Image (tube, rainbow, N blue to C red):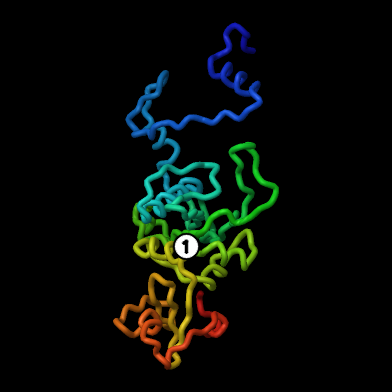
Amino acid sequence: MLSRRKVPRYFQHMTDLSSDSELVPAPKLPPLQGDERFAGVDATVLDFWRFAMSDLRMNNTRGYLAEFLVARALGVDARRVEWDDYDVLWGVVKIEVKSSAYLQPWPQRAPSQIKFSGLRRRSWDDTTAKRSEDKTYKADVYVLSVHTTRHHDLYDPLDVSSWAFYVLPRARLAELNVESLSLATVAGITAPVDYGGLAWAIAEAAWGTPQYWRRHGTYFKFTGVREYILRPDGWVLYDVSKSGPSWWRVSGEVDAEIINETDLPPGTPR
């Protein structure tokens, strides 16, 4: 048992903090570089990182990696905040990142089932240090990230081409009114994008409400950012000059009509 005369300084600080009736904000610390040394042990911060996060397949670490990739795709270099209602802030756009994978670093009988949970959460209030009573959708855009590798000998955690990203706006989740989604359900709602198309997909989800067109039996989608044409395997980027929705809006083509989402062929990803 600790003597009162020899209480370490950090315990004294905790006692002082708990006696204060007002919330005391934690000061921001400068970002660590990795070569800083611990006081009292022969180790650096990099040694700790190697100890705790050297395997990028681990659930928590893979989640951090997915958030990092989204931030980098958008040019965001701010550090993540553990308790925020979102993972990445892009200007005013709040982005929640979820990740899942078929392969885990522990023995498996079969690949994992892909599912995204915790889509609707209680928000954190810095002024009360408590979470809200009700669960709601806190972000503007949701990026559901899947590491697609199914064989351990092909798993390269540093290869971003192994990821597929499904991007949904908050309004779409609110329509579904769910707290979790299976990959099968997500794939029926929207098509995946690779890392190179991630920033565009997030921009579309944040600011573009899709508009659907039909011309001579062919379907098109216009988000205000990019145009797509419907092919047998889903929506494909369409960039033919003066022959898509953005041109029809200007030229007033009479044989191209704006249609509702319900007029799309059954099973079409939105």
Q: x and y percent of residue 19 in the render?
A: 65, 21
**Residue under the image location 41 percent in, 33 percent down:** 48
**Residue under the image location 39 percent in, 90 percent down:** 253
- From the viewer's perspective, tell me whether residue 46 is left or right of residue 258: left
**Image quadrant occupied by the N terminus:** top right
Q: Is residue 13 above or below residue 98?
A: above
Q: Which type of secondary structure does the marked residue at label 1 adopt?
A: helix
Q: Quadrant of residue 79?
A: top left
Q: Nearer the viewer, residue 87 or 51?
A: 87
**Residue under the image location 37 percent in, 26 percent down:** 43
**Image mark count:** 1
Disc 1: which residue: 206
- From the viewer's perspective, tell me whether residue 251 is left or right of residue 262: left
Pick out the residue farthest to the top.
5
Q: Is residue 87 above or below residue 42?
A: below
Pick out the residue farthest to the right.
133
Q: x and y percent of residue 65 in the render?
A: 42, 49
The amino acid at mark 1 is Ala
Q: Residues within 10 Å of mark 1 (few under 14, many from 20)?
A: many
Q: Is residue 34 above or below residue 102?
A: above
**Residue under the image location 43 percent in, 41 percent down:** 53
Q: x and y percent of residue 119 in the render?
A: 59, 56
Q: Nearer the viewer, residue 260 or 8?
A: 260
Q: x and y percent of residue 220 in the render?
A: 43, 82
Q: Quadrant of residue 252?
A: bottom left
